[in-house]
Amino acid sequence: MFTLLKRSISTLQYIQLPRLQKIKYIPPHAKDITPEEYLKSIGRGCEQIADKFESMEQLLSKTSEELEAMGVKTRMRKYLLESLEWFKRGKEPVKVELPKRRNKYIKDKERVKLERMKKLGLA
C-alpha cells in the first residue's frame, strides 16, 4: 500500500521528543499521501471528515481539542489520533474494523415484552 522507506528520525528519537515537538513533527513520508487517502485507508468512517483538512501537514498537527472544535466525535477523534501517532512513528495505516455485536438477548426481550403485555391485559 504505502512504502515508508525514508525517515528523517528513528522511532526511538521520535518517542523521546517533547510533547510539543511531537505534535509539530511531520514525517517525510506524509508528503506522499493526501488526507483523503489516509483517512480512507484507516476506515471506521473517517473519510467523512476528509474535507476538513487541506493537507497532510494540517491533519498531522491537529490536537484533540482542535478536532473537537471542528466537530469530530470522541470515538473517531481517539481512533484518528492513535493512528496518526503510529503513522508518525513510521507504521503504515491499517484499517481496524469494529467487531459486530451479537443479538444475544432477542428471545429474552420478546419474552419480557409478552409478559408486560399480559400484565396490562393487552395480550
Image: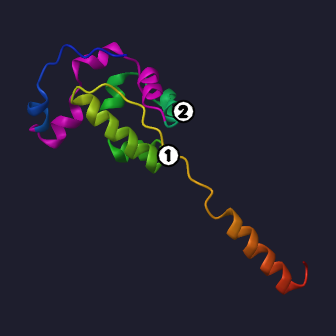
* Segment colored magenta: 16-43
The residue under label 1 is 99
- x%, y% of residue 41? 44, 26
Q: Secondary structure at mark 1?
A: loop
Decide: few, some or many residues near mark 2? Use Cα within 10 Å; few <14, some 14-19, many ≥20.
few
Question: Which residue is at a point 35% across and 45% down the rendered structure image?
Answer: 64
- x%, y% of residue 43? 47, 32
Q: Secondary structure at mark 2?
A: helix
Task: Tell me whether circle 1 and circle 2 mark residues in contact (CB < 8 Å).
Answer: no
Q: For this view, does 11 lie left or right of residue 95?
A: left
Question: Which residue is at a point 86% across and 84% down the rendered structure image?
Answer: 120
Earlier sequence position, callout 1 versus callout 2: 2
Tell me the tag on residue 48. 2
Task: State the residue in front, 9 or 94.
Answer: 94
Q: Is residue 44 above or below residue 1?
A: below
Which amino acid type is shown beneath numbered disc 1? Answer: Pro
How far apart are labels 1 and 2 at the CA level? 20 Å
Q: Quadrant of the C terminus?
A: bottom right
- x%, y% of residue 68? 43, 47
Q: How many marks?
A: 2
Decide: few, some or many residues near mark 1? Use Cα within 10 Å; few <14, some 14-19, many ≥20.
few
Q: Is residue 3 above or below residue 67?
A: above
Q: Is residue 35 magenta?
A: yes
